[in-house]
Image: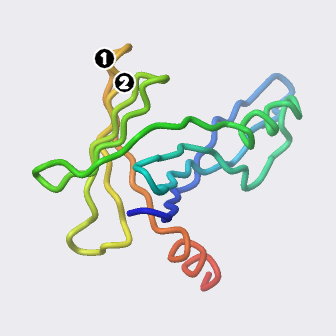
């Protein structure tokens, strides 16, 4: 796991405003694993589509949460981002080891969601083929 970087699919929070103007920033979530069980959650702007405020682009590009990770007795990857009250529980896909599947829990909001991440070099290779 260490020294590996994984990217989510493309994400946006687009808004349609008066005058029929669509604003949005396309970005990806990124999970990077480092030595000493350090994990970082960052965001990468892919395409700033007419952002309402340029500072939103800077905010996403500078977004970083640092946590810790370990592999539990069941073989699950556990990422703890205590500062955000997030716990990621994941596994490499048994059908494609390049994919990480996470169930994410926000303990503060008692909310769950899921995300899939692909190994960065595989993501970049698949994008070049299109």
Whole-percent x, y for residue 13 in the image: 64, 35
Against 19, residue 32 (above or below) is: below
Q: Residue at x 11, y 50 (%)?
A: 73
State the separation of the CA atoms marked 1 and 2. Answer: 6 Å
In what quadrant of the picture does the N terminus appear? bottom left
What colouring does the structure picture have?
A: rainbow
Q: Residue at x 58, y 54 (%)?
A: 10
Discs 1, 2 touching: Cβ within 8 Å = yes
Quarter location, residue 59:
top right
**In the rendered image of this protein, does residue 88 appear above or below residue 109?**
below
**Residue that carries the numbered disc 2 in the rendered image:** 106
* Left or right: where 99 falls relative to 51: left
Identify the residue position indicated by label 1 in the image. 110
Q: Residue at x 36, y 45 (%)?
A: 69
Residue 30 is left or right of residue 23, and the answer is: left
Q: In front: 107, or 40? A: 40
Instruction: Determine crowd level at label 2: few under 14, some 14-19, many 20+ residues with C-alpha closer than 10 A.
Output: some
Q: Which element is circle 1 on?
A: loop
What is the residue that sits farthest to the top in this orientation? 108
Q: Farthest bottom residue?
A: 129
């Amino acid at each position: 796991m260490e020294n590996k970087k994984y990217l989510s699919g493309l994400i946006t929070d687009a808004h349609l405003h008066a005058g029929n103007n669509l604003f949005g920033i396309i970005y990806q979530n990124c999970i990077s694993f480092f030595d000493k069980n350090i994990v970082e959650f960052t965001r990468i702007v892919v395409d700033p589509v007419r952002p309402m405020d340029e500072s939103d682009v800077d905010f996403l590009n500078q977004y970083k949460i640092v946590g810790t990770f370990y592999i539990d007795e069941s073989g699950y990857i556990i990422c703890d981002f205590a500062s955000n009250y997030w716990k990621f529980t994941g596994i490499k896909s048994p059908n494609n080891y390049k994919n990480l599947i996470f169930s994410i829990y926000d303990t503060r909001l008692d909310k769950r969601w899921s995300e899939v991440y692909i190994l960065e070099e595989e993501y970049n290779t698949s994008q070049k083929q299109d």
